[in-house]
Image (tube, coloured by chain):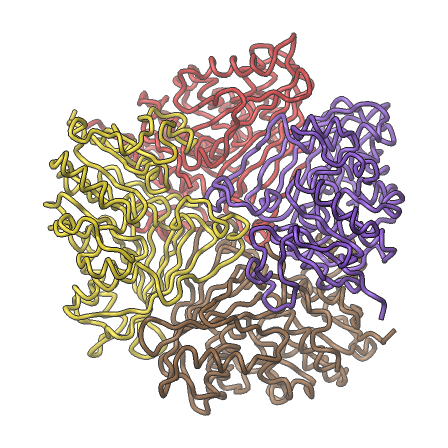
Chain colours: A yellow, B brown, C purple, D red
């Protein structure tokens, strides 16, 4: 039997943490040896997530007491709140420089630390680590990721918008000044902290936009789209909250450039993703539902013609906790460790 | 005590029909004397809608046997499926020409019968009645409605988009060629017919777009926007289905014209609707939730600046069964009958 | 026009408080002059409940600063957390002895202050007020309520179980030692405080029992059932949480005594409630859905025969925020003030 | 690599069919070679279940044209509607007598064909096959299943009630005449046929009992409980529908016999299931949520003391589509084929 990678999950008491544990428990090359939590340190996973009651898992411990050198982990998944990760990883990588890290927070996603400071309101605490961080959208940056020690796992909204748009931008097929991204997310994207606005009775049987005109994921979109375009790109982006748990759907309005029709855009995407395991482009004119990817690492993309001449409507979906977070993180781990890219994350969507 | 209007509801076994009955049961000037249904003719309302069990209501009858002249109804609400209404109303108004009609179907919404034929695939069966039909969006066409015998109650999606956009178009404040309407509706908008795609297990915990690039409500939008603009207007419009019962939210992307900012657009709407009972414009930068209008006849509108310079994002909400259908229909009845406009439809939203 | 009662709502920032405001805004004899809140003092209702944005309402104030004598309120609704009400009402009724109070907390529901101390873990702070408190289940205690100054509005679970069971117990028709009440409630019954277990993602798409074997509502059931029976009664009662907002359904398993069949039990209930506006007994064999009473003050009761000989299954439903709390409270106010019992609370259920 | 079993799924266009396909696609020893459907014959699985779009699957065919002898399937899963299976299997097993069958319908669950005739209203069409059918509740009948050619997979409600109750009945630990089973199921248990009562708008935000006093699953409960007891047992059983997709929760009220306490009952269950992979007994006093088993083959059981002396409350949960149907069916296949019992069905629950 092949050896297993020794794995740590930092922040295992949140939804992306538990989702990592769910999949890693069944990953053939993973051995969970460290789970950390803050307020729940000392507890068992079954105390904070009773669905793990039947499984043996390491006791949750506080990060502060971890001896990184002694543990000599192969891979650490970092699912900590934004802005707390930078100093944690500085220490970890200083003490255990051979450990690979996949960070699920936003802390290392922006290559430009000035942009980080602007959007997050404080200086970046680990600018030297930022330099080596690789943006972990596998289908776009696969080659760099294989060599990386520190991967910045992309955001859920951004993955859902970047996967359909980056190939079109790279192909110079769409007008860069008229992109509108109307994005809708299930509630797990908002995390597990107890806030009134996230109570069942405040969320169910209702729908709303939020962060209209300003949302931190925009910085990530700017970076990736501008890099793909070779010039600054600014899009209209509005996030909304759906009364459901899992799933993001982005409705994207674009205008073809130089005569490109909706069919042309569809052909570009179909070709770009022809060999990918986790991106599926539907036949022209069909658009996907979030329920078609629930619990899976799949992204589905549809393209249809708008009746406004020259414009196309693109719809993309993914499960925000899987391809939008923990599934993509394991996909990154598989690349870094040289495993088959689909290992442990090839579950078929759970429908209904 | 004031006399009561004798009321008929055609198609009482659907959701808009039952919603009319719900509100008319408590309307001080309404007396329900006729309820019709097709397959459920002969049954009681409590058989098809058990929440009416405690109330005395007329037995459901088939439309065919109704003696319109003898009944001499003051007002008929017509909540029949699209394309079935034209011949029904021809007969009704021939036999009882003094009866006023509020039609909730799409049959009389398009003034141009050629446009009707194009979008609905067959000739209009009552073109002479179409001539007298008035489009019943009260806040825009109040004066004509007061004099009307036949009011075409607007669609739910269209009401939600027209209320925020028509004042802006009339003011020549926005670019007419770049309007994007991303609309999301609760399931009751799809009616009560038993289809696999509308089963609970196919709808809950999921979200999807439909009719991408082509949806009949577009014809209605074209008509009203073009009339307001004095020139043809074609918008991008994408409807989506939400895993909830009631509520439509439209996220509308516009570009200010001749230097108009988002604040300017907000001021136009605030002034336009200052005295309206059923349209509430939120302070600049705030956007409404569908849950803030559930079960009420209220529309709420918010305006925020987009970070893309010169653009604004408008969010509007209403309850598709109330202001988007039956509440607006009763508002039209109140106008026609000379009652206070808010009579019987001033319920406060049910939250949560 | 008839004079209006001057009304205060203590604890207006919770769900039962907002539900009182929703209905009182449209009550013909009510004038809202005082709204209190704790952490939200100084805010407007629209800040804590945006669905009230279109309405003019008093600013939320802290209870401590209220001058009860000067205000001279006719009626105060007290929707404060359990255990905080006793001292508030002592002060209020000392300063304004003519004010009538309907208390929606559990503080005055148990006539026996020793039972209170046992279930709530501390001495009752206002035993002298307890003596005059009347248990406000209108259909059972209507006569006493008319004369009361202080009404203890019953709990939601208890109302739903007492309405079907008390007439049967009084008629000595069922075995008192084999009553099983399996109760299921929507989430609004749990209130509006931000707790992890009440987050949308922890609640939706799932179902669970809680407080198995021990729940404070049992004390109230014991009191009312024992009083009706003239001897101590202890029932099995298990509450559950439903992934929905409003509604309680109780499935009640009983055994007929002295040959009473399920039909006999049905006949007793039908007769007992024949003239009631807010209790509707369905035909034998039919059972109600929570959705048939949503947003209304109606209780529906159904009775069916169990296949186990001699046993019957009773199903009762109500909206926990209306008949289970605020609607019943206004029904109590109507009695105390000599208004028509149905005034302001006769809304038809909102379905779907 | 080990050889794979050639598998057929009859009725692949329903929810239990698609759930079989979901799991078998990732089962290391399964090869899907036949998928049948009735109205959807000729279509691809992606046409009826778009979440299968990324996978290669056999085209759906009609059952009538299948050449069972030529196909020589190792295992057939039969997920056809009740009453249609008997003749299908007669033909199949006549033509291909070596094929093993796991039937998910109710057609072969009742050993007594007279009981079948009584509950289902017609004679059993394959009484000779009924004789060899084995009731497929693995944890209770494992030994017989290993030898079986035809396994009757148990119902979802019955599995959820039998797993906690059969060990207690066998131990003579509870009173057999006072068992009350209050059961609640998610909507997928009702299947995928388009009925008004199953529409999203008729189901969401509501809860109801159904089949009160009479439900076909009772026959199955009678059979298994009576067999375990060695005497006839009749229980009170009431099913309810939850506004959610997956999960059954049974709240079971029992009385200990001969001084057995709730703790004693818990100890019996804990011991009985100590070595099982798919039944997890929680610590005494804890009760499970349906969300803790969603998408997994796990059953969780909790036991608590009732405050009524001598009585206990048992709560059990499972996913009706997995352990309540398709997961258990694959567990049966694993036994029949001599595979590891957990193969392909060891997914961790998907929470949230």
Q: Residue at x 76, y 22 (%)?
A: C177
Considering every residue shown, the one lying at the far top of the view is D258
In the depicted structure, whether residue D239 falls above or below residue C258: below
Q: Residue at x 50, y 33 (%)?
A: D289
Quarter that holds the C terminus of chain D: top left
Q: How many badges with numbers are in the image?
A: 0
Q: Closer to the camera, D79 or A29?
A: A29
In the depicted structure, whether residue C301 falls above or below residue B82: above
Task: Specify the quadrant of the image occupied by residue A218.
Answer: bottom left
In the depicted structure, whether residue B169 falls above or below residue D172: below
User: Is C231 positioned to the left or the right of C58 in the image?
Assistant: right
- Residue C228 location, x and y as percent? 84, 31
- Residue C259 location, x and y as percent? 85, 24
Q: Closer to the camera, C230 or A329?
A: C230
Task: Specify the quadrant of the image occupied by residue D168.
Answer: top right
Q: Residue at x 29, y 58 (%)?
A: A121
- Residue D139 location, x and y as percent? 45, 19
Q: Closer to the camera, B262 or D297?
A: B262
Q: Closer to the camera, C256 or A334?
A: A334
- Residue A104 location, x and y as percent? 27, 46
Task: Specify the quadrant of the image occupied by residue A270.
Answer: bottom left
Quarter that holds the N terminus of chain D: top left
In the depicted structure, whether residue C206 falls above or below residue A72: below
């Amino acid at each position: 039997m092949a050896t297993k990678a020794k794995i740590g999950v930092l922040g295992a008491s949140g939804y992306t943490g538990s989702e990592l544990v769910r999949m890693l428990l069944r990953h053939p090359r993973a051995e969970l040896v460290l789970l950390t939590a803050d307020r729940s340190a000392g507890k068992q996973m079954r105390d904070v997530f009773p669905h793990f009651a039947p499984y043996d898992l390491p006791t949750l411990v506080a990060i502060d007491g971890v001896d990184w050198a002694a543990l000599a982990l192969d891979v650490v998944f970092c699912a900590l709140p934004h802005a707390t990760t930078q100093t944690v990883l500085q220490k970890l990588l200083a003490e255990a420089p051979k450990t690979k890290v996949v960070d699920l927070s936003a802390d290392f996603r922006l290559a430009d630390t000035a942009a980080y400071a602007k959007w997050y309101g404080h200086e970046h605490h680990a600018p030297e680590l930022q330099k080596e961080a690789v943006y972990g959208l596998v289908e776009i940056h696969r080659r760099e990721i294989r060599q990386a020690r520190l991967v910045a796992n992309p955001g859920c909204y951004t993955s859902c918008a970047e996967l359909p748009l980056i190939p079109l931008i790279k192909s110079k097929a769409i007008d860069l000044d008229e992109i509108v991204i109307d994005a809708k997310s299930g509630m797990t994207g908002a995390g597990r902290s107890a806030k009134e606005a996230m109570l069942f009775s405040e969320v169910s049987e209702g729908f709303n936009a939020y962060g209209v005109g300003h949302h931190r994921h925009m910085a990530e979109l700017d970076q990736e789209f501008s890099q793909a375009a070779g010039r600054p790109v600014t899009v209209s982006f509005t996030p909304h909250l759906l009364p459901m748990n899992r799933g993001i759907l982005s409705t994207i309005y674009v205008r073809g450039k130089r005569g490109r029709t909706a069919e042309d855009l569809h052909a570009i995407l179909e070709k770009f993703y022809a060999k990918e395991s986790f991106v599926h482009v539907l036949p022209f004119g069909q658009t996907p539902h979030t329920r078609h990817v629930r619990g899976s690492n799949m992204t589905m993309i549809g393209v249809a013609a708008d009746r406004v001449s020259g414009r196309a409507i693109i719809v993309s979906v993914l499960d925000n906790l899987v391809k939008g977070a923990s599934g993509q993180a394991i996909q990154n781990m598989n690349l870094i460790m040289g495993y088959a890219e689909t290992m442990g994350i090839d579950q078929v969507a759970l429908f209904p």
